[in-house]
């Protein structure tokens, strides 16, 4: 018997002894989908410098090819988010984009409008004091609603750089109302059975006030806008030590958790590989998500099933595809660990007020070596047991480096 098989047999026996349904756990892991972003395959950087990477994607077709490679290595990344206008195809032929994605075995995911990079948006987009510029931003977002129809996307992912840098620069009340008016128009143009996810960020690039500064603002607007509007949580968009898992739980119970942009932070919006700095936080977030998936409360369980899991990272110095694969794997590992929490026992300890034992139970699960479980799942899915190793061994990195060369073209970020 191989070392992998022996380790899996021991873990499977332990799971069974804890009352876990081994097959159900494996099925859940197989079906846990992580969307990757087109812009993560292109050159990117900070406001100081974008370092070009040999082989980085320069066209939407190349981004799709890279996303397909990540999916082949992991088996759980079958969709790719597009950023408009970075991913506008030649002749606006979205049918060709859709066809090529299908040929590669992937599909188009969320559509992300860009209302922060044009010179006109110096003072904001939907919050701008100039009505003509607000109209320009709104027209672009409505164009993205049309692109959703053309690509089969059911998610409009909205992030705004809007805000002010100085007290007195603009009326905070006026900016709030401008945003509400613009988002209301957007909500009326969403394709049927689609959602708009409102992302928030507490600072940067605006430093005095940010127009969508926190989850409470996004939540309040999503209530006004109706069932098609929900909140998007980016792990890097919070102040230090904010309890993200508590936000997740609140929004799940309210039916307003729409999705995630996964990444990791040390100081600000670092956009590092998810799980690279604080893997325990990632586990705790997934613990709440899996608890919701297994909830006896129908609306919580249904809401958890519809959460969109997406990566949003800038790989500036570490390559492009390998870090994206690692990001997907880190999410998968955290999800797998959360599947192993003995929830009946944890609930008993919590209700009895046994503080240390409740905490110890959860932390012990977070330390579980789930590599045998993931190896078994990947074997059954016919994907590499070691996706990172398989990627480097595939020769794809050398191939795209030779074919594409070194380009200073970025994926949108300058």
Image: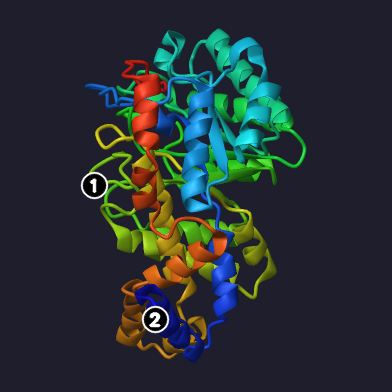
Residue projecting furthest to the front? 1
> Label 1: few (<14), some or many (≥20) within 10 Å?
few
The answer to whether residue 35 is above or below residue 414 is below
Which residue is painted at 53% across and 39% down in the image?
68
Tell whether label 1 touches label 2 (CB within 8 Å): no
Please indicate, yes or no, whether residue 237 appears anywhere in the rendered image: no
- Marks 2 and 1, the one that precedes in the sequence: 2
Determine the secondary structure under disc 2: helix
Determine the secondary structure under disc 1: loop
Please indicate, yes or no, whether residue 224 appears anywhere in the rendered image: yes
Give coordinates of residue 88: x percent, y percent.
57, 18
The answer to whether residue 42 is above or below residue 106 is above
Q: Circle 1 sits on which residue?
A: 266
Q: Circle 2 sits on which residue?
A: 6
Instruction: Please give left or right for residue 119 compared with residue 270 in the image.
Output: right
Give coordinates of residue 18: x percent, y percent.
47, 88
Q: Quadrant of the C terminus?
A: top left
Give coordinates of residue 142: x percent, y percent.
66, 22
Which residue is painted at 33% across and 39% down in the image?
271
The answer to whether residue 232 is above or below residue 335 is above
The image quarter in which residue 283 lies: bottom left
The answer to whether residue 34 is above or below residue 158 is below
Which mark identifies residue 128? Answer: none
Which residue is painted at 52% across and 23% down in the image?
60
């Amino acid at each position: 018997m191989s070392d992998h098989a022996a380790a899996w047999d021991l873990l499977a026996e332990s799971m069974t002894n804890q009352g876990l349904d081994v097959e159900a756990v494996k099925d859940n892991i197989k079906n846990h989908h992580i969307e990757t972003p087109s812009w993560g395959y292109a050159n990117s950087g900070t406001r100081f410098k974008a370092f070009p990477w040999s082989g980085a994607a320069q066209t939407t077709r190349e981004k799709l090819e890279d996303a397909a490679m990540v999916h082949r290595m992991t088996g759980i990344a079958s969709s790719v988010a597009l950023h408009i206008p970075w991913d506008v195809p030649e002749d606006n032929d979205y049918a060709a984009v859709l066809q090529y994605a299908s040929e590669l075995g992937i599909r188009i995911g969320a559509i992300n409008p860009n209302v922060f990079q044009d010179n006109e948006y110096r003072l904001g987009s939907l919050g701008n004091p100039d009505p003509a510029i607000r109209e320009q931003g709104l027209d672009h977002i409505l164009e993205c609603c049309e692109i959703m129809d053309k690509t089969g996307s059911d998610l409009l992912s909205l992030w705004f750089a809007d805000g002010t840098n100085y007290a007195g620069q603009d009326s905070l009340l006026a900016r709030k109302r401008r945003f509400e008016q613009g988002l209301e128009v957007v909500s009326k143009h969403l394709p049927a059975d689609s959602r708009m996810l409102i992302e928030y960020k507490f600072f940067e690039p605006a430093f005095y006030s940010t127009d969508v500064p926190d989850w409470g603002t996004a939540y309040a607007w999503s209530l006004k806008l109706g069932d098609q509007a929900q909140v998007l949580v980016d792990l890097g968009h919070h102040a230090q030590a904010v309890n993200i898992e508590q936000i997740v739980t609140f929004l799940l119970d309210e039916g307003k958790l729409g999705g995630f942009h996964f990444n990791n932070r040390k100081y600000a919006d670092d956009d590092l590989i998810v799980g690279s700095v604080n893997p325990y936080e990632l586990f705790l977030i997934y613990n709440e998500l899996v608890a919701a998936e297994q909830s006896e409360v129908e609306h919580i369980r249904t809401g958890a099933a519809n959460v969109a899991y997406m990566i949003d990272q800038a790989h500036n110095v570490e390559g492009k595809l390998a870090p994206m694969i690692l990001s997907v794997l880190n999410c998968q590992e955290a999800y797998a660990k959360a599947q192993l929490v003995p929830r009946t026992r944890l609930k008993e300890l919590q209700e009895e007020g046994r503080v240390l034992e409740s905490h110890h139970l959860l932390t012990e699960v977070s330390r579980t070596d789930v590599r045998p479980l993931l190896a078994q799942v990947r074997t059954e899915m016919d994907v590499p047991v070691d996706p990172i190793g398989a990627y480097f061994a595939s020769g794809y990195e050398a191939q795209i480096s030779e074919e594409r060369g070194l380009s200073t073209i970025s994926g949108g970020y300058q």
